[in-house]
Image (cartoon, helix red, strand yellow):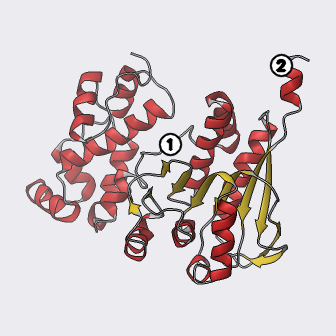
Amino acid sequence: MSMTEIEQILPPSVVAILAFDGVQPIDFSGPAQAFVTANEEGANPSYAVQVVGPSPGKVMTAAGFEIVMNAFPSGLISTLVIPGGPGVYALRQDAGWMTFLATVAKRASRVCSVCTGAFLAAAAGLLDGRRAVTHWRSCARLAADYPAVMVDGRPLFIEDGPVWTTAGVTAGIDLTLALIERDHGAALAARVARRLVVPMRRAGGQKQFSNVLALQNKGSAPFDALLQAIAAEPSRRWSVQEMAAVAGQSPRNFHRRFVAATGTTPARAVESVRAELAETLLRSQGLRVKDAASISGFGSGVRMRRARVRQGRAPVDGVGGG
């Protein structure tokens, strides 16, 4: 029998996605769709995706519609997905449900929490002594409620042994693409990403939200239009006079007011936006260093490397072409 014939009879990898009252729809539907799309793109072995619970029945999602869950599959499973949603906070107080979760997790090759599903994983003891992430709005609460968990609120997702955690919402898709790449290689994961019209792929270490949004979250309302303009035209020269004009400020007062509102200087803000764009061009689109430097506004690979060092980003050597 040929290797191809052997591969054709491999049993599917079972993916069990938990469901409960108050589950957030995108936390289970995003990963589910990515796995199903991988099947459509030729994953071998394929993924047998099931939405499950302790017993079959209906649950009400956080969006107000019902979904049907199946009984938890018997035997070993490849991937256990624990989604989040407002229902996790009450569910973690349910001793029976938490015992069920801790038990079935032992039958999984890997356990993945999505968004606030990390609270369920932590309550079941699955995150003790591990690095973990959840949605940025809930990181402080996760750290306070579960001191044994090493919460890192910066990355999109974290792999710590057989346990993966993710920031949630669309980051659940990023995590699933990483799993598909691990299982079947980058080529298949890239085809799935193209089908889903998402980047291939945002690195797990990438921050949960963009530098522009991070600056806007600091109360920079008077400068939001400027920040968006910089993001839209990163290769523009962006002199102090030009930035002041876009912001509707006098050049004399612009610098002081910008620093007070954002906590950084205008020049550093421009550099930060450019560095983030370069990161995407290099890692998600695979551009050569010189091309990424040109598009992102650095002008040369040397300037881009120096800026990335100042931004605390990884070196670009070996990423993309020369």
Marks 1 & 2, CB-CB < 8 Å contact: no
Q: Quadrant of residue 304?
A: top left
The mark that comes first in sequence, 1 or 2, is 2
For numbered disc 1, what is the local secondary structure? loop
Q: Which residue is mark 1?
A: 202
Left or right of 4 in this view: 34 = left
Q: Which residue is mark 2?
A: 3
Query: In this orientation, which residue lies closer to the viewer: 219 or 130?
Result: 130
The N terminus - image quarter: top right
Query: In this orientation, which residue lies closer to the viewer: 305 or 95?
Result: 95
Q: At which x and y percent is residue 97?
A: 67, 77
Q: Quadrant of residue 169?
A: bottom right
Left or right of 305 in this view: 17 = right
Q: Measuring 63% from the left and 82% from the top, which residue is drawn there?
A: 95
For numbered disc 2, what is the local secondary structure? helix
In this view, 25 is above or below 157: below
Q: Is residue 222 visible?
A: yes
Q: At which x and y percent is residue 41?
A: 77, 35
Query: What's under tag 2, amino acid-wise?
Result: Met
Q: Measuring 58% from the left and 84% from the top, which residue is drawn there?
A: 93
Query: What's under tag 1, amino acid-wise?
Result: Arg
